[in-house]
Each structure stands twice: as structure tokens, then as C-alpha cells.
Image: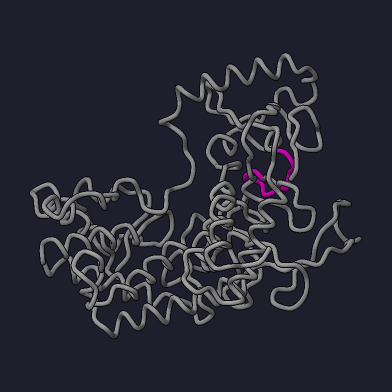
Amino acid sequence: MRKGFCLNKSTEYLAPQFIWGLKTAIFCGFLLLAGLLAESCRAGHRQDVAPAIPASLRHSEKPDDWYRSAEGRQIADNILTWQSPQGSWPKNVNTKQKPYTGDPNKIEGTFDNGATTGELRFLARAFRATGDKLYEQAFLKGLDHILEAQYLTGGWPQYYPPAKDYSRHITFNDETMVRLMHLLHDVAESVPSRVEGSAEYKFVDESRRKSAEASFDRSIECTLKCQIRVNPVRDTNLKDSNLQEKFSNGVNGKLTVWCAQHDEVDYSPRPGRAYELVSLSGKESAGILLLLMSLDNPSPQIIEAVKAGAEWFESVKLTGIRQIIGIDGDRVIVEDPNAPPLWARFYEIGSNQPIFAGRDGVKKYTMAEIEAERRKNYAWYGDWGKSVAEKYPKWKEKWSIPH
């Protein structure tokens, strides 16, 4: 457990324009109150990361009759038009709202930001309800694309064929790989012998289901190999004097969690965009642990990975601070002893200190030190560890795992 103080330069500042001047708890309390009021007004306008399945595609609660209705059929037909020739869908586009009328060859399909897996789940349900072969064909094309895009090492890039930039790395960022793994697991488990309604993907042929199962197994192996093992050392060659840790995956050291991106060849942590530095990820690692805890009969390797990850989350949680959003959308950290725990998006490997960066890529140790645009439009803090803390004791009890 760790504590962050809004008035301590070594942890976090209240706001950049007051970095060196805020000294009183009175002002901190005033800012907290104002921010909470503003936050409530802005509840529907936050720009956090994309959900696992885009909200525009969440229709799992709809009955089959809805998928057979004019509205359901129109949405499914619209989604069909957005599928790329390779089999994927573009990101940050509402693919259900209207049909795509441009050149299909210009569609930039991806697995990032909830793209492709959301559309595939929708089309699978639409096919089950309507029997329309066009929906089935589009689903199978997309599934084949996912299977083809997997690296021999078991992970996926953001795009396939992969680009030469950071997007080629194994991408856990924004749950990209976790969503693909969940879909493949569901396909592999949906055998035709199951009762009606319990096998969403039972129309998938046996050959593809076996391929999905093998792909999922490889992705689990990849995930376990990516989990970062660290050995604390003092690196005198660093520009700063902070304690660092050299990682040696799969060899020695203490297991921790994952970076948002990993090398597609040797599994080592890799940076993403300029402000996404090599780090231990508080957000992406939570999704990975929840996936691992969802598996039946966990292997000794999975048990070790989950125990280490859950312990890490407990050790780095931030108490006594609250994140608020001002009227201008700026995010600010203030002291609040009654606030629930927070976790940082990124932690420095070695020191476990929260780290931040602007578009210049320079590492900072407080969110207040980066530019306002990045503070407003990126999720630097969240309650991601809460779900891990809630699930972990139940998981240990279910599988009789000793403390």
C-alpha cells in the first residue's frame, strides 16, 4: 500500500499552474469540492480508453427477435459494409450507424480500441437469430483474419499485416490482446453438442474451433512469457538516480505484471506512443489477470502468474488521493483521506513510482508536469485494481490455493 499527497512534490501536484505555491489544506479542500461538482456535470463527456466492446455494439441483452427486426437487420447490414478486404474493421467509427459507401480498399481495419471483436460478436448473434449466410461469411472471414494475424510467439499486433512502428508489437494496450483471447476462447468452447442458447458460436466448423483453441493456448503461453520478472539493481549509467530494475523474463527475479506492449520476438517490454513509456501497466495488467482468473483448472504457471500479479496490485495501490476533473476538463489530483484506492496507468520498473509523459516522451513523476492536452485526454489514473482485489480471494478459494 502506498499513499500519494497532493502537496508533496515527490508524488503529485494539485495543478500545474500552482505546482510550487499550494501549501494549505483549505485550498486543497476547496479545489476538491469545485472539481467534484464539475466532474458530475461532465460525467457523460469523459475521454477515457475504449471499452472492451464498443458501446455502439453492445446488444447482447437483446432478444433474437430484435436481431430479426428491421432495426437489427439494418445495423447488421451496416456493419457488413465496414469490413475490410482482410476481414477486420476500423477503429473509432460507429459501424452500426450508417453503411460505408467508399472504397473498401481504403478501410483500415485493426484490433485496437475495441474494433473487429465487437463487430464479430454482433454478427455471430445476428447469424444465429436470422440464419443469414452473409453474416456467417463475414464472421468466418474475420475469424480467419485473427488466426492468420497471430505471431508465432503467440501475440497479436494492432494491425495485420503489421506496420513497422510500435503497433507491430504484441499489444495488450486497451485490452487489444485480451479481447482477441476472450473471443477465441468462446469460439473454441462453443461446441455444437451444447444446448440451444448456450453456444453462441456453435455454427463454426470443427476445424476452425480447433484452430481457435490452439491459438488461445499459444496466446496464454505468450502472456505468461511476457510477464515481467525483475531484479532490483542500481544502474549508475542512468541520467537520474532513481532505483531501476533490470528485467529478465522467464529466468530470474520476482514476477510482477505486464507492460502495455511487448516485443513480438523476445517478449520484452516495449514503448507505444511517445507518452506510453516502457513500464508496468496498472490498467492493462488488470484485464490480463481477470482473464487468467476466468480459466478453469488453472495450471501451476497460471497460479504463479495470478498470485504475483495480485500481490503487485496490492503493493502499488495509491490511497489518500482523488482524481477530479475541472470545468475545463483538466484532471487534477488532490488529497482526500476518504477516497477509494487508485492505481496509476504506468509504473516505473524498479521503483514502482507512477510515471507520466507528454507528447515529448520525457518521463515525469507527476501528472501535473505534463501538458494539459495529455492530462485531459488520457486515463492516467483509474480503479483498475479494484476488480482484481475483489476477484482474487474468490479465485483462491474456488481452486483451494494456499496463501
Quarter containing the C terminus: bottom right
* Residue 227 percent location from the top left of the image: 64, 68
Stretch in magenta: 357-366
Instruction: Decide if residue 25 is on the left or right side of residue 322.
Output: right
Q: Is residue 55 magenta?
A: no
* Residue 344 percent location from the top left of the image: 64, 45
* Residue 67 percent location from the top left of the image: 14, 54
Q: Is residue 372 above or below residue 160?
A: above
Q: Is residue 331 above or below residue 294?
A: above
Given the current orientation, which residue lies at the most extreme bottom position? 207
Instruction: Decide if residue 229 is on the left or right side of residue 114.
Output: right
Secondary structure mainly formed by the magenta segment: loop
* Residue 305 percent location from the top left of the image: 63, 68
Residue pictured at 66% horizontal, 55% vertical: 277
Question: Which is more toward the observer, 78 or 14?
Answer: 14
Residue pictured at 47% horizontal, 69% vertical: 295
